[in-house]
Amino acid sequence: MLRIVVMNPKGGCGKTTLSTNLASYFSTQGAITTLMDLDAQGSSIFWAHKRPELANHIQLVDAHNSPHNVTRSWAIQPPRNTQVLVLDTPARPDLANLSPLLREASAILIPALTNEFDLHAIVNTAQQLQRSLPSQKNIGLVFNRINKGLPYKKQTTMLSKEMALPVIGSLRDSCNYIRAAAKGLGICEMRGSHYQTDKLDLIRIAQWCEAQNEKRDKRKSQKEGTQLLRHIDPDSIILASTA
């Protein structure tokens, strides 16, 4: 299973935009995709409920609104047929509560804006992650709302070196994402040549996640033989969603 955790302590940095677009992309590739919303605001769930009937199916796990006739631990488990799991985490997460999910992640994505406040927040987050998960090599930065006409590459390169984390991609400051979200779609489901640049940006991020998953599975197969997958502990999900 490809497990992608999207996290940043700052709100409004693009976690839901990245999470929903990744879920959309993998569903278009034929993967059985589950989108898990750990944020009490439920923005990912709101987006998913707007999807057209003919859109590729995305399974949902709402960590805050479980059916009354089942236990929460049962309701928040991703379906067993899941091939790709995307977790949209809340702002200001408790890393101690989130760490069990982070340890099981194939890829951890930190979306951020390039203003001083957001950059300060991700420097602190990156340092905490590296202290709590020193062996994790699957953490990548994604800069959001980038104006590619401005000289931002020097800044991102400097930050990447400072935090010892790769900048694996960026999303443009574009109305295309807003148009797609309004329809309950991802950028890769939109038609028209003016979406092509944004599609390529998203695909590069998705492919990086897939590459991290392949490396992880190879390491685990060498270490554990054929035992590659474990189900997520429901208590870990509950803790993460109350962070």
Image: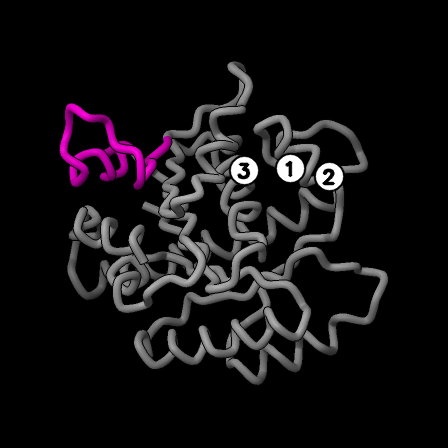
Earlier-in-chain disc, 1 versus 3:
3
Q: With 62 as the anchor, is 26 left or right in this view?
A: right
C-alpha span from label 1 to label 2: 7 Å
Give the image location of residue 176, x and y in percent.
73, 39
Q: With 80 as the anchor, is 164 left or right in this view?
A: right
Residue under label 2, please give it: 176
Q: Residue 38 carries which label?
A: none
**Residue bounds of the magenta highlight:** 60-81
Q: Do the residues labelled 3 and 2 touch (CB within 8 Å)?
A: no
Helix, strand or loop status at disc 3? helix
Earlier-in-chain disc, 1 versus 2:
2
Q: With 55 as the anchor, is 101 left or right in this view?
A: left
Earlier-in-chain disc, 3 versus 2:
3
The rendered magenta stretch, by its main secondary structure, is classed as loop
Q: Are marks 1 and 2 in contact (CB under 8 Å)?
A: yes
Disc 2 marks a residue whose amino acid type is: Asn
Helix, strand or loop status at disc 1? helix
Is residue 88 visible in the rendered image? The answer is yes
Give the image location of residue 117, x and y in percent.
61, 72
Residue under label 3, please give it: 25
Residue under label 1, please give it: 187
218 vs 108, nearest the viewer: 108
At x 21% / y 49%, what residue is drawn?
232
Q: With 176 as the anchor, is 234 left or right in this view?
A: left
At x 47% / y 78%, what residue is drawn?
124
At x 23% / y 26%, what residue is drawn?
67
Give the image location of residue 73, x and y in percent.
16, 40
Disc 1 marks a residue whose amino acid type is: Ile
Q: Does the magenta stretch include residue 218?
A: no
